[in-house]
Image (tube, rainbow, N blue to C red):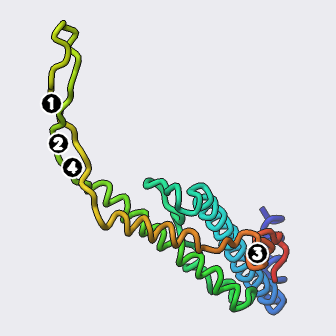
Amino acid sequence: MEVVLHKNMIVLNFLNYNIGVVTFIVGSLAIYLYIKQRVDRRRDAASLILQEIRYAEQQIRNSEHGVRGYSLSSKLLPTNSWNDNIHLFIKSLKETEIDMISLFYSQATYIDFLITERSNQKLNQEFKVVTIPQIVNNGTPQGLIQQQTTQLIPVPNPNENTTIGILTDISQKIEYLYNTPAVEKLRKISERKWYHLV
């Protein structure tokens, strides 16, 4: 018991006599952790933005620039990390590069809006019942008889063609970013190791 008490006294005396050194060490550690946390947040945001750009471009390519059509059940940008984290990359990217990425996100967000609009048009599609006369062979010697069948036919929606036209037009004008210098800078940021604090 005395040995433990003696060791505790030595540690306390050391801390009391070297309070400046202890404060310096604790302060340095706090600053290091703060800087590391900022760098980690920046790296994680860059990784997420890269993923969003890659996924959105893949969806646009799969739709053949909007000509074949988009899946109404998915979005180009399920999340939008660029708008939330643009401030983290102000010093790393040129103004033109920031503008390029912002334009891409703006266009992709608008395409998502148009996909939602198109989905709503499909959900609210009106149908009319049409009676169609048909001549059918009944298998008797008399031969053919006339029957009537009913079918549901969609009522044309003039807004639907406008939405499809805008969707195709915007999709064909969007510029791909994934292999540009701006995204390459984001890629380098996302690949930094834990010990790179700058």
Q: Residue at x 66, y 63 (%)?
A: 54
**Callout 4 amino acid:** Phe
Q: Quadrant of residue 105?
A: bottom right
**Residue at the spot of label 3:** 180
**Callout 1 amino acid:** Gln
Q: CA distance from mark 3 to mark 4?
A: 47 Å
In the rendering, at what x and y percent does residue 131 appear? 15, 38
Residue at the far top in the pictured view: 141
Closer to the camera: disc 1 or disc 3? 1
**Callout 2 amino acid:** Val
Secondary structure of residue under mark 3: loop
**Residue at the spot of label 2:** 130
Relative to 35, is 152 on the left or the right?
left
Closer to the camera: disc 4 or disc 1? 1
Is label 3 in contact with label 4 (beta carbons under 8 Å)? no
**Residue at the spot of label 1:** 148
Q: CA distance from mark 1 to mark 3?
A: 62 Å
The answer to which of marks 2 and 3 sits earlier in the sequence is 2
The answer to which of marks 4 and 1 sits earlier in the sequence is 4
